[in-house]
Image (tube, rainbow, N blue to C red):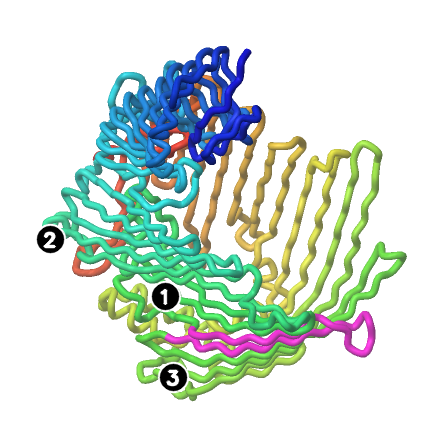
Amino acid sequence: MPRFLCLFPFFLFCLFAQESYKANSSQLGEIIADKLSSDKNKIYAKGNVVLISGEYYISADDVVYDKSNKTAEIKGEVRVYKGSDLSFSAKSVKVDFSKDTFSLSSIYLQSVESGLWVSAKEASSQNDVYYFKENTVSGCDIQNPIWHLDSSSGSLDQSDDVLTLWNTRIYIGKMPIFYIPYMSISTNNQRKSGLLYPKVAYLNEDGFYYQQPIFIAPYESWDITLSPQIRTSRGIGISGDFRLATPRDNLLIFQTKYFYNTKKYVQKYSILNQHIYGFNLDFQTRLGTGWFDGYETLNDGFYSNFTYMNDLDYLRIDDAGKKVGDRLSVSRFNYLLHSEEHYFGFYNKLFIDIAQANNADTFQLLPSLQYHKFYDSLFWQNLMYSIDVQANNVMRKEGYGYYENTINIPIGIELPLFDGYLSVGASTDLNFTNINLYQTQNLQIANNPNINYKNANFFTANYSASLATDLAKDYGDFMHTLQLMAKISGPYYRYTSNMFSDNVYKDYSNAVIQISNDSSKTSEQKKFIINNLWNPSSIVDFDTNKHKFEIQLSQYFYNNAGNTLFYYNLSQKLNLQSQDYLFSESMVNEIGSSPIDGLDMKASIYYSFLYNDITEASASVDLEKWHLKTSVGYYYKKLFASNTSSINANFINFSLSNDFGYFSLGGEVNYDFLARQLKDWSVEISTDIRCFGVSLKFAQEIASILTDEGNQPLLKSITNNYVRLEFRFTPLSEVGVSYRFNK
């Protein structure tokens, strides 16, 4: 078989000649074919043409190269391989080496990393950018794709790995389901600027809901996402996310949101806030701030999780179906510095009750300073001590505030006896608290109008003595461990200002009950009086300064695989201060078992001997094994006040899901025995077949909204029923539509 040296640059390939023929061109390569010939300025290669260059391998049926104008025509099944992966194929290719451009017909492109492929009738290329018309894109099998995208035109930038499509129709099989005028896709899963997948839904109160995220990533270190939205029956809004990665691998996220409710919507549903807005800042150092990198024994860190909002609907601006379960939002802004022996902390806490119109009367911790000396030996190895000092500014706009200074010094000793089978411990805790109040113009002390309320002090010296054992025995097939501890504790010296006397604690509790039951006052008047009523329990817990006896029992059984066959924990505290309230605290019983991997069973019962009744109980069973995942949980709580009692919570929840291979089925349900009705429930069926997935979900949920019914803020619950259809296109993303309707 004759061989000739030919010129063939392709995708900027430099091909190297096998024969000794030289040409005045740098585009030289090795070509193998069944038949090679030349005629003046043209070189012909026919039949099983193969070109090799480095890691690239190119096959075709015919190649004609014109040396005069440096163009080549490649016909047949043109295939380009990189290593063992096919990256490009076409029916025919025309290359102009002088302009570094080429045109293709019946092109086929495939991304090795993502698995996406593109086919088009016509295409051209210049500087590593492909331009094509009437193209098809999919991540499924090319012969019969489950899903595909048909576009009028598009481009693929190989240098940036970005696929751009115009006038795109999304098909499942032969059925069109969605239209997108423009979309940009990263073929190697890297951050690229462009439009993200929209959120689409129909909501019974809000109308048609459409949100279009716009992703902007100009640099590797930061990006921005802007997400304007419209709700045709409610209003418009926008949210923005700014993310910054620092050189020390720390991530800063700043998010702000705004939504405008139309006047018609506000009047129809008695919405409290026409303008909903807020922001949140999240930042945490992983490797420290870097300020103390030159000190081996010093480490520091910064943490911020700061949120401000004027309405709980702020949490649902980006997700209309988001369930909000906690009405209290806590923001933190903290810095810490520590060595092996010392710790310093600077804290800030902001509390927002989203059920209130404003939080002017909510206590805030702005700021708090702490110094802590870690446990260390004192004169003797077994005699341990530590020091904790704190200074807190507890403030609010309306009502009294105070500066709190505390010092806590625990000193203790623990001695092992009988080769460690038994240990004896004794300790003392020295606690000092100083309070300086401000904004006291409306402050009242229940039944004690003559007490000086400018400052107060509280000092206690507490004792503690304990006896504990920790035993373990191996029985061959299983191991048994037993821990038993008995402890007695209480104050042996106590000094308090009049503001912390026992009578003030009792008078405050009685005053709150009387004010709450006073029908002659409005709710706002009651709230004002209680907020300005001195509450000593918010600073020093009255019950902690009592003589108590505590007993704890724990035992565990383990098998040889390390699974917990069975465990039982018991604890009981006795109030030695009063014979009538000896059993003022409930006995806690906890049992559980995890005999096999994936199965966890546990239950707890709080029993009060004072009321001869169960105060709290819970039980749960969780199983995640094979293709099955299920969970059952029950919770019960009973409150006691004087001679009356009321059930505060009594509900059960159940969830079950299983993958049957061809499809998976799952659901959950919550039943409230107090309301005698189903609360939240959902049923979902889904399937994933290689490159495609679809799920259909029916659900009901209880949501809370903030209204101004009765000219006062009111947290109102509404019932939402909805259905959601979601499509997953591998390796792209997912898109879904929701319809929410009245119960």
At horizontal 28% and vertical 51% (from top left) the residue drawn is 226
Left or right: residue 132 compared with residue 87: left
Residue 513: assigned label: 1
- Give the image location of residue 486, x and y in percent: 73, 59
Q: Nearer the viewer, mark 2 or mark 1?
A: 2
Q: Is residue 252 above or below residue 596?
A: below
Asked if the residue under mark 1 is in contact with the one under mark 2, i.e. CB atoms within 8 Å, the reply is: no
User: Quick one: label 2 or label 1, which is nearer the N terminus?
Assistant: 2
Label 2 crowd (10 A; few <14 / some 14-19 / many >=20): few
Label 3 crowd (10 A; few <14 / some 14-19 / many >=20): some
- Quadrant for residue 521, please give it: bottom left
Quadrant where the C terminus sits is top left
Query: What residue occupies the far front of the structure in this picture?
Result: 40
Left or right: residue 301 compared with residue 63: right
Please say whether residue 161 is one of the residues in the magenta stretch: no
Please say whether residue 384 is one of the residues in the magenta stretch: yes
What residue sits right under mark 2 in the picture? 263
> 687 or 537: which is nearer to us?
687
Residue 534: assigned label: none
- Give the image location of residue 435, x and y in percent: 48, 82
The amino acid type, in three-letter code, at marker 1 is Ile
At horizontal 30% and vertical 34% (from top left) the residue drawn is 155
> Circle 2 — which element?
helix
Residue 438: assigned label: 3
User: What range is drawn magenta here?
Assistant: 366-395
Q: Nearer the viewer, mark 2 or mark 3?
A: 2
Predominant secondary structure, magenta span? strand
> Circle 3 — which element?
strand
> 444 or 726: which is nearer to us?
726
The amino acid type, in three-letter code, at marker 2 is Lys
